[in-house]
Amino acid sequence: MRDALGDVQSVLVLGGRSEIALATVQLMSAQRVQRVVLAVRDVASAAADAEALRSNGCAVDVVAFDATASAEVHAEFVRTVCEHTDIDLVILAFGIVGDQTVADDDVVHTLDILKTNFTGAVSVLVPVAERLARQGHGTIAVISSVAAMRPRRANFVYSASKAGLDAYASGLCDAYAGTGVHVMTVRPGFVHTRMTEGMKPAPFATNVGVVAEAIVDGIRRKRNIVYAPNILRFVMPILQNVPRVVWRKLGA
Amino acid sequence: MTQPLRRTATMSGWGGTAASTATAVEPDSVEQIPAILKESATHRGVIARGLARSYGDAAQNAGGAVVTTDALDRILQFDAQSATIRVQPGVSLERLLQFLVPRGFFPTVIPGTASVTVGGAIASDIHGKFRHGSFCDYVETATLVTPSRGAIEISATQNPDAFWATAGGMGLTGIVTEATLRLHPIATALMRVDTTRCADVDACMEAMVDDSLGERYSVAWIDCTASGKSLGRSVLERGEHAPLDEIPANRQPDPLRYGHGMSVPGPPWAPSGLLNPLSVKAFNELWFRKTPRHPHRGYVSIPGFFHPLDLVRGWNRIYGKHGFVQYQFVVPYGQERVVRSILEQLAQHRCASFLAVLKRFETQNDGMLSFPMPGWTLALDIPVARSGLNTILDSFDEMVMQAGGRVYLAKDARVDPQRLRVMYPKLERWESIRGELDANRTMRSDLARRLGL
Ligand SMILES: Cc1cc2nc3c(=O)[nH]c(=O)nc-3n(C[C@H](O)[C@H](O)[C@H](O)COP(=O)(O)OP(=O)(O)OC[C@H]3O[C@@H](n4cnc5c(N)ncnc54)[C@H](O)[C@@H]3O)c2cc1C
Ligand SMILES: NC(=O)c1ccc[n+]([C@@H]2O[C@H](COP(=O)([O-])OP(=O)(O)OC[C@H]3O[C@@H](n4cnc5c(N)ncnc54)[C@H](OP(=O)(O)O)[C@@H]3O)[C@@H](O)[C@H]2O)c1
């Protein structure tokens, strides 16, 4: 159960090798977390991450999960994971940036990005939210991105996928009001992780530690939207209103 | 038999933290209870809920059923001869006081609020300013509806194991559907109160131990914001039911009239920042200063002495939307330094505490999860809108545990389950008795899930 101070006891991470998610769970595991389920594409690849969490004293399960699987598979997956115990917190962390230059010429790649980040996310969020509502409590932290707020030429397919996810999460939050389920949308800026390796850092670039703290604090305070770093809460509305000509010149 | 009303509701405790959603079941007769337990066995269990004055998650059950006892509020039998009263579980202590005081009787143990039910009082084995026993010491007998053994009579002599597992058992052994309480005779409805200002916590404890006055009740209000030399400066109140010949002439004709005093509404909504260290300091300063410097004696109403906070309706809302926790622990005599050290650290961390109450116990009963033990108990409220609080409170828990003390489950909303096992050495025994009364764990609450009970 989540306690009065917002600390949780069990966590399911969808995209269990995500550096952002692992930093978050690592931070929480020093507190009350007793059980962690890492849902990953390749079970063997998460062995070291699982071991690191175990050394903090939590029980860790690594289970196979592919975001692009069918809705039936997702439903079955959620049933199995939640069969015997409650899940207090679900972090939806998987995602791919893809390669915009490839997507420009290849609709298949474009759809792959959407299938992972948007439709894949939605098809697992549906059974997850239903399950948490049945247990009468729980938090879902959906990792969106500031890219959802203003698409950039350089990665607009990714932006579109996150915009869809972001809108869905926000609606889900309203739809489940009064069920004990809370949905929190997380909008990081540029974060130094495997995903952004080799890319030119954007302004306000940050590291996983900052994002992890923002997520933990957001869960504690039952925030609806969390930015990391927090300054983006004020910067993004400005960027959203930059005229298109200027935006193009900025090379954004 | 009619069907109880059911509705979906989101519930939390008095602290307003960690809400969860469940099906509230509202029986209008105790006969419906066995069927409710049976239906709940297959799903996510069931727990009783009285007036929800426990601070944390004891009376809620996410995704399962929560039986409210509001409508089970009949006084069944009063016997002045044997000084006992038989009641249904939803009868509140306020209702009991209204009924009993004019008849010259008093429920032996009452807590800091009259808005608790008899069922909740048994499940938490509540204590008050009375230091010679807790609520269940004065429960002559009770009826407990259990999932595995059906309805059983429990008392200190009949099914004693079930009785002492239920006393303080946080509703996890079954639902109490009836109880007979032993009463204390009184001559007037007034309290004689001796008030003393104490310069610091040591002086306060010294004064509390000195019971030359031989009074029945004692409590000290501690100003948690004072530090350094005035650490733990406090106002000590010692009370006794006033004898007939002491009360003012104008009260003589009707000495047992139960006084209500007035009640002012608390704020319907308050911003989280309202209760900051500064405003708390100002409040405590006022409270301390309004008490005369020299010991003095006065006569006040029963609510005025026992339930001053009940006069402010909904005061818990001043902590804002994130709510608050009440931290209450007890440590054995000889461990006074733990009280001092916790007060010191609170002042250091500037954990705003609106209320800190120091009491002491002289006895302990056989309740396996009962809180009271001979020693000092300190209770304080802390708003939760800050991070790092669990780390601070965990360090307090560690000190309390090492000192052989414990935290109070009726107030708890965050203790580490592993420490709880050390704090309550009879927990294993409780689990085995619970296994007999409820083999499939039909009785379940968020507190039980959180603490692995
Ligand atoms: C302002 C204030 C001051 C307080 N002061 C004190 C004090 O001085 N001393 C003290 O000991 N406590 C004190 N308390 C705590 C309070 O006395 C206990 O939490 C008490 O249990 C609340 O009773 P309730 O009817 O509100 O029960 P709830 O909070 O609704 O439930 C508490 C527990 O009782 C169980 N329960 C309720 N009814 C039944 C039933 N019929 N059968 C079985 N189990 C049942 C519930 O399942 C739950 O586990 C105070 C609380 C407040 C808000
Ligand atoms: N880094 C940033 O700058 C940034 C900024 C804003 C938002 N975000 C978002 O934050 C989240 C976490 O990213 P991160 O930075 O921690 O990157 P990361 O370490 O690369 O994590 C992303 C994870 O998603 C997993 N994944 C990808 N496709 C999947 C699929 N089909 N099924 C299951 N898992 C899949 C990957 O699994 P494998 O290990 O198997 O590859 C990888 O572990 C992502 O949603 C990302 O979009 C990141």
Image (spheres, coloured by chain):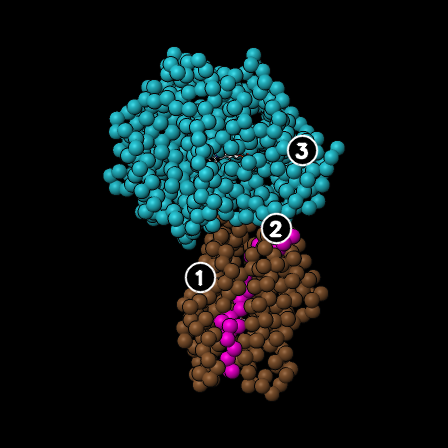
Please tell me which residue is depicted at 46% across the width and 66% down the height of the picture.
Answer: A227
Measure the C-alpha gap from mark 1 to mark 3.
Answer: 48 Å
Q: Who is closer to the viewer here, A224 or A216? A: A224
Residue under disc 1 on the same chain as residue under disc 2:
yes
Crowdedness of circle 2 by 10 Å Cα count: few (<14), some, many (20+)? many
Mark 2 within 8 Å of ligand 1, using the beta carbon: no
Please, which chain is the residue tagged with disc 1 on? A
Residue depicted at 61% across the width and 57% down the height: A176
Secondary element at tag 1 = helix
Q: Residues within 10 Å of mark 3 (few under 14, many from 20)?
A: some
Label 2 sits on residue: A136
Percent coordinates x, y for residue B300 in the rendering: 39, 24
Residue B228 visible within the image:
yes
Q: Which residues are magenta?
A: A132-154
- Chain identifier of the brown chain: A
Q: Are marks 1 and 3 in contact (CB under 8 Å)?
A: no
In the figure, the shade used to draw chain B is cyan
Q: Which sits in the foreground, B50 or B182? A: B50
